[in-house]
């Protein structure tokens, strides 16, 4: 009898451990992203931390960054390339963050779509609790020259990659970060994309894209990039030329409010970005004015992206005015 009791206790402990190790199930239902069958709203941030003087991603400041993200009510981190260090993913998971892992098309055979090595990464990390979605490409529709000047080549590759993911991972959706609203060709050729991310820069008001999406698709969508920078190239719309955190804060507030006012269509937003990137426009030891990005004329409020000024914190992790806006709106949504 005593042996039976011991066996039952061991079985209970073993079963409990298995349950603890089991990762969340991410799925979709109609226009919603679900985690363990509960609707999930992305209160996200794009994250590519590059230190001063470097042009390479570095997670040495991760502990402080995650603390700031938690303070701001962020629940989702979008990265542009896979995170290979499991300790980084573990830390994100411990901070209750979900991660959207991005795969590039041609990255020299390293976790990329062209070589097929991306699926090795999926297989390695598909049971990690931090994973929210697998993202294929970032604004590739703006670059047909990368695909023999025929964007259909990209859509075919993307759709095939998404199918490969479906075949090996039943617990996480596929997504893409499309530049703006996808057209009929993109939708027709990409049936294996479960959630459409869209990088949208329509001044400070993305409102129309939600009704536009509603008319062309029944799938979930979210804004994979949106926001504004903290430098004004010219004086415009009541904002002075030069460093201008107020312009960024006002634009961020209006954009996030628009997203959260359309939750019947939108699954949230990943604001661009967490920290300023000094590596993007010139000398990576200083913060340069300038930088260019495709279809960036809709950047508030000067129509110029000023690539090194997009963080809601500076490269030294000083909070900008936009950080306070994000904190207020993300935490408010958390309490609704």
Image (spheres, rainbow, N blue to C red):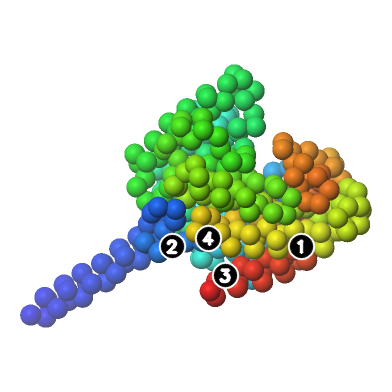
Measured along the vertical axis of the image, is residue 180 above or below residue 242? above
Foreground of the two, 268 or 202:
202
Query: Label 2 to label 1, Cα distance in Å?
Result: 28 Å
Which residue is at the far bottom? 2
Crowding at dot 3, Cα within 10 Å, few <14 / some 14-19 / many 20+, comes out as few
Alpha carbon distance from label 2 to label 4:
11 Å
Q: CA distance from mark 3 to mark 1?
A: 18 Å
Q: Which residue is mark 3?
A: 333
Front-most of residues 295 and 27: 295
Mark 4 or mark 3, earlier in chain: 4
Q: Picture coordinates of residue 222 (x, y %)? A: 55, 51
The disc at residue 86 is: none
Q: Which mark is residue 249?
A: 1
Q: Above or below — where is 153 with respect to 89? A: above
Q: Nearer the viewer, residue 56 or 220?
A: 220
Is 48 above or below relative to 21?
A: above
Alpha carbon separation for disc pair 4 and 3: 11 Å
Q: Earlier in the sequence, mark 3 or mark 2?
A: 2
Number of dots carrying numbers: 4
Q: Residue at x 53, y 46 (%)?
A: 213
Q: Which residue is under mark 2?
A: 39
Residue neighbourhood size for the residue with mark 1, other residues' Cα within 10 Å, grouped as few (<14), some (14–19), many (≥20)? many
Callout 2: few (<14), some (14-19), or many (20+) C-alpha neighbours within 10 Å?
A: some
Q: Name the residue that disc number 4 marks.
A: 263
The residue mark sitting in front, 2 or 4, is 4
């Amino acid at each position: 009898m005593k042996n039976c009791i011991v066996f039952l206790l061991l079985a209970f402990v073993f079963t409990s451990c298995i349950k603890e190790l089991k990762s969340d199930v991410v799925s979709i239902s109609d226009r919603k992203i679900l985690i363990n069958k509960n609707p999930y709203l992305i209160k996200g941030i794009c994250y590519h931390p590059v230190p001063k003087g470097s042009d390479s991603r570095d997670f040495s400041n991760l502990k402080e960054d995650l603390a700031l993200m938690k303070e701001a009510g962020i629940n989702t981190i979008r990265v542009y390339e896979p995170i290979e260090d499991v300790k980084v993913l573990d830390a994100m998971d411990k901070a209750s963050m979900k991660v959207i892992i991005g795969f590039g098309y041609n990255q020299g055979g390293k976790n990329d779509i062209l070589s097929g090595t991306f699926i090795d990464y999926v297989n390695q990390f598909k049971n990690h609790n931090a994973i929210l979605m697998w993202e294929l490409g970032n604004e590739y529709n703006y670059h047909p020259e990368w695909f023999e000047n025929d964007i259909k080549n990209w859509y075919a590759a993307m759709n095939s990659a998404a199918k490969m993911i479906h075949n090996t991972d039943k617990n996480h959706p596929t997504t893409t970060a499309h530049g703006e609203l996808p057209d009929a060709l993109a939708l027709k050729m990409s049936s294996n994309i479960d959630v459409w991310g869209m990088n949208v820069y329509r001044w400070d008001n993305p409102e129309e894209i939600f009704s536009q999406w509603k008319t062309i698709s029944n799938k979930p969508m979210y804004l994979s990039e949106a926001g504004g920078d903290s430098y004004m190239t010219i004086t415009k719309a009541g904002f002075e030329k030069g460093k201008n955190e107020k312009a960024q804060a006002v634009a961020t507030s209006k954009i996030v409010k628009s997203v959260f006012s359309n939750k019947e269509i939108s699954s949230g937003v990943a604001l661009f970005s967490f920290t300023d990137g000094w590596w993007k426009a010139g000398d990576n030891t200083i913060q340069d004015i300038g930088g260019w990005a495709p279809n960036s004329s809709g950047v508030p409020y000067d129509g110029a992206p000023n690539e090194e000024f997009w963080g809601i914190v500076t490269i030294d992790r000083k909070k900008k005015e936009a950080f306070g806006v994000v904190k207020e709106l993300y935490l408010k949504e958390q309490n609704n």
